[in-house]
Image (cartoon, rainbow, N blue to C red):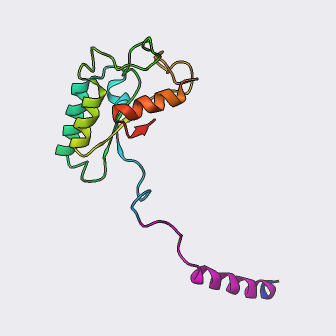
Amino acid sequence: MLANMLPTTVAFAGLVFVAPGALALDNGVGRLPILGYNTWNAFVCNIDENIIIETASLIQSLGLQDAGYTQMNLDDCWGEKNRSAEGLLQANAERFPSGFNNLTSQLHDMGFNAGIYSDSGWRTCQDYPGSYSNEALDAETFHNWGFDYLK
């Protein structure tokens, strides 16, 4: 039995060594998983624009950005409890008085990508508006605010 398996094994081993490497674009995409920071574990719903920028500055000063931690993600509780009269999601005016365009611009100027959380249901886990039946509108809103990533 072993004698019958030997030619197959040798032939297979030959294929393993002859086979080319994986085919992929050499553009840097996907070389590492997304590395960064998410507000939930440290702050839950107690987030505001100052905490986000202070945290980004801390990540820079600790050398984590140079190590690849380039993502800053806002988790739940960033918005108002209801959509605008036009049906748009809204940044919480008290916690993000400068608006998300300003926040994402600051993060981009610091070399970070900006991410934001939403939910595919009617409401998020903390009972803020979700994106159900508003997926395209919300995606456009996040894009217009300057976000690079949607969690």
Mark yes or no: residue 116 visible: no
Relative depth, front residue between 139 and 45: 139
- Above-or-below relation of 14 to 34: below
Whether the magenta-drawn stretch holds residue 54 is answered as no
**What residue sits 69% from the left and 86% below the top?**
11
* 55 on left or right of 149: left
Farthest left residue? 61
Farthest front residue? 86
Residue 135: x and y in percent read 53, 29
> What span is colored magenta in the figure?
4-26
Residue 150: x and y in percent read 44, 36
Locate the N terminus and report the quarter of the image it occupies.
bottom right
Relative depth, front residue between 126 and 94: 94
- Taken as a whole, is the magenta stretch helix, strand or loop? helix
* 37 on left or right of 131: left
- Above-or-below relation of 32 to 138: below
**What residue sits 36% from the left and 47% below the top?**
35
Residue 70: x and y in percent read 30, 46
Whether the magenta-drawn stretch holds residue 9 is answered as yes
